[in-house]
């Protein structure tokens, strides 16, 4: 079953991006993926609610792509949530527009994976820090997938980890659009990053 992906990209300083921008450009090459650069489209933060809701209605999978900023999303993604996910549209009485769609966070974290543990510098795992977004998806009736994340993003390019990550990202997007992604298994994982190939079947 073919699925359409809406990718909402939020990076406020793209000239410094070594990972998110290559991932965004790679996503633009996949048929079935609609890529929206929120900071480019809404530099004044005046988000067109009708346009964004129509985009949501015409896609099956919603992806937030962003660098982790202070344990959350860049500001424009929060603004997007606050304005677009209205009562009566995304939740509440009659708010069933997003029921059954998939939701995924694709993000980068500057710190190492060791820093995102109870005993680490940040004290919480990444999946714990993302719980507000998980609850957002749950409240909207969406199926929440564990994050596709790259830790240590500040040194990924220098350590030659970027190509492998971009390749995995493209395989994931392609499998999702072609209906080759096992969502039942994926929903039970803590992270998609290391186990993508276990979730993808070869046959279309």
Image (spheres, rainbow, N blue to C red):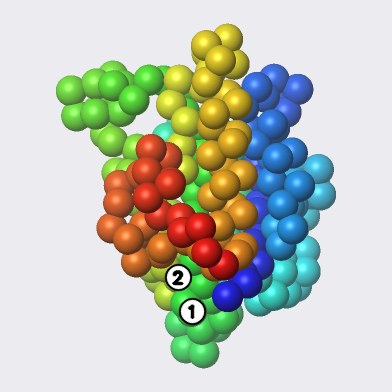
Q: Residue 128 at x, y = what percent?
A: 29, 44
Circle 1 residues within 10 Å: few <14, some 14–19, many ≥20: some
**Disc marking residue 18:** none
**Secondary structure at numbered mark 2:** loop
Residue 61 at least partly seen: no
Question: Circles 1 and 2: CB distance less than 8 Å?
Answer: yes
Q: Residue 23 at x, y = what percent?
A: 65, 36
Q: Residue 126 at x, y = what percent?
A: 34, 38
Residue at the image position 61 percent from the left and 63 percent from the top: 177
Mark 2, residue position? 142
Q: Earlier in the sequence, mark 1 or mark 2?
A: 1
For residue 113, what is the image quadrant?
Answer: top left
The single residue placed furthest to the left in the displayed view is 119
The single residue placed furthest to the front in the displayed view is 203
Residue at the image position 30 percent from the left and 51 percent from the top: 189
Specify whether 121 is left or right of 199. Answer: left
Up-down: is 136 above or below 173? Answer: below
Residue at the image position 70 percent from the left and 58 percent from the top: 33
Specify whether 43 is left or right of 151. Answer: right
For residue 164, what is the image quadrant?
Answer: top right
Residue at the image position 30 percent from the left and 28 percent from the top: 116
Specify whether 110 is left or right of 7. Answer: left
The one nearer the camera, 203 or 54, is 203
Up-down: is 170 above or below 104? Answer: above
Residue 119 at least partly seen: yes
The quarter of the image holding the C terminus is bottom right
Specify whether 190 is left or right of 50. Answer: left
Looking at the rendered structure, the number of numbered marks drawn on it comes to 2
Mark 1, residue position? 99
For residue 127, what is the image quadrant?
Answer: top left
The quarter of the image holding the N terminus is bottom right
């Amino acid at each position: 079953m073919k699925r359409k992906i809406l990718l909402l990209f939020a990076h406020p300083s793209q000239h410094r991006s070594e990972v998110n921008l290559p991932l965004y450009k790679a996503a633009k090459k996949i048929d079935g993926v609609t890529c929206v650069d929120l900071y480019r489209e809404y530099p004044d933060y005046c988000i067109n609610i009708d346009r964004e809701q129509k985009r949501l209605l015409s896609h099956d999978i919603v992806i937030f792509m962003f660098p982790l900023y202070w344990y959350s999303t860049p500001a424009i993604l929060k603004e997007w949530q606050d304005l677009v996910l209205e009562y009566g549209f995304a939740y509440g009485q009659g708010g069933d527009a997003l029921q059954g769609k998939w939701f995924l966070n694709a993000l980068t974290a500057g710190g190492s994976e060791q820093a995102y543990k109870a005993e680490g510098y940040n004290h919480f795992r990444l999946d714990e820090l993302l719980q507000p977004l998980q609850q957002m998806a749950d409240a909207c009736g969406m199926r929440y997938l564990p994050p596709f994340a790259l830790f240590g993003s500040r040194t990924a390019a220098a350590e030659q980890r970027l190509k492998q990550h971009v390749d995995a990202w493209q395989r994931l997007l392609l499998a999702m659009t072609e209906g080759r992604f096992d969502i039942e298994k994926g929903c039970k994982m803590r992270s998609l990053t290391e186990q993508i190939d276990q979730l993808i079947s070869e046959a279309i």
